[in-house]
Amino acid sequence: NAGVTQTPKFQVLKTGQSMTLQCAQDMNHEYMSWYRQDPGMGLRLIHYSVGAGITDQGEVPNGYNVSRSTTEDFPLRLLSAAPSQTSVYFCASTPGSGRATDTQYFGPGTRLTVL
Amino acid sequence: QKEVEQDPGPLSVPEGAIVSLNCTYSNSAFQYFMWYRQYSRKGPELLMYTYSSGNKEDGRFTAQVDKSSKYISLFIRDSQPSDSATYLCAMSFDAGYSSASKIIFGSGTRLSIRP
């Protein structure tokens, strides 16, 4: 199993550009989520999904869109990049019903810089 | 005031020392307390969790919760250079369906074990 994969590993954008961060998992997990990690802020939830076709907002959803057309893939779209979106982005998948105490399997992260 | 506070470190100790990592929190409704380990340039991984107050041991790691003081700790005995990582505490009100969306993370403490 590859686990959770994320592409790209690094990305530099200009303000106003759009892009999609890709996330895929091969563990057949229903629950998937996107976090951003900023210095001194910890991990903050952007969006999550409890299964194909179902998504919901997390703590910091503004400026991001998600969709979940398959169990395996959960892309994150930046609509119009802003410098405040410079961060490290992690995708995670969780087995079962996505309980807080279940093991979340994190991808390796995407380092995004917005100029 | 942040809901979860964690000293960012860095904390540097010699190999074999006992390490104490701590978090404080403000919301008495938190019931589940988790510790994640994050190696450099990697995603976090769940180390262990405890429910309510008390201790939980797993090998060289002991998690302790003091709800009366709103204070949690992670102790690492016989610390090894391979324990060098950032340790994030995390908390949740419940562990039911989709409750992974309700996890609040600390900002992490960077730990370095000197050989």
Image: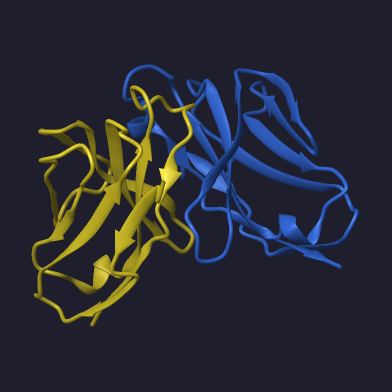
Chain colours: A yellow, B blue
Residue at image location 51% in from the left, 41% down from the top = B4
Q: Nearer the viewer, residue A105 or A57?
A: A105
State how many labels appear.
0
Quarter-wise, where is residue B34 in the image?
A: top right
Query: In the rendered image of this protein, does residue A96 appear above or below residue A78?
Result: above
Q: Left or right: A89 with respect to B108?
A: left
Q: Nearer the viewer, residue B68 or B105?
A: B105
Query: In the rendered image of this protein, does residue B10 appear above or below residue B58?
Result: below
Q: Left or right: B41 with respect to A16?
A: right
Q: Nearer the viewer, residue B74 or A110?
A: A110
Quarter-wise, where is residue B75 in the image?
A: top right
Q: Left or right: B84 with respect to A67?
A: right
Quarter-wise, where is residue A8 in the image?
A: bottom left
Residue at image location 34% in from the left, 55% down from the top = A5
Residue at image location 46% in from the left, 45% down from the top = B2
Residue at image location 63% in from the left, 41% down from the top = B23
Residue B65 point in image, percent of width and height: 68, 26
Residue A50 point in image, percent of width and height: 23, 29
Query: In the rendered image of this protein, does residue A75 appear above or below residue B95?
Result: below
Residue B66 point in image, percent of width and height: 69, 25
Name the residue at the front extreme: A1
Screen quadrant of the C terminus of chain B: bottom right
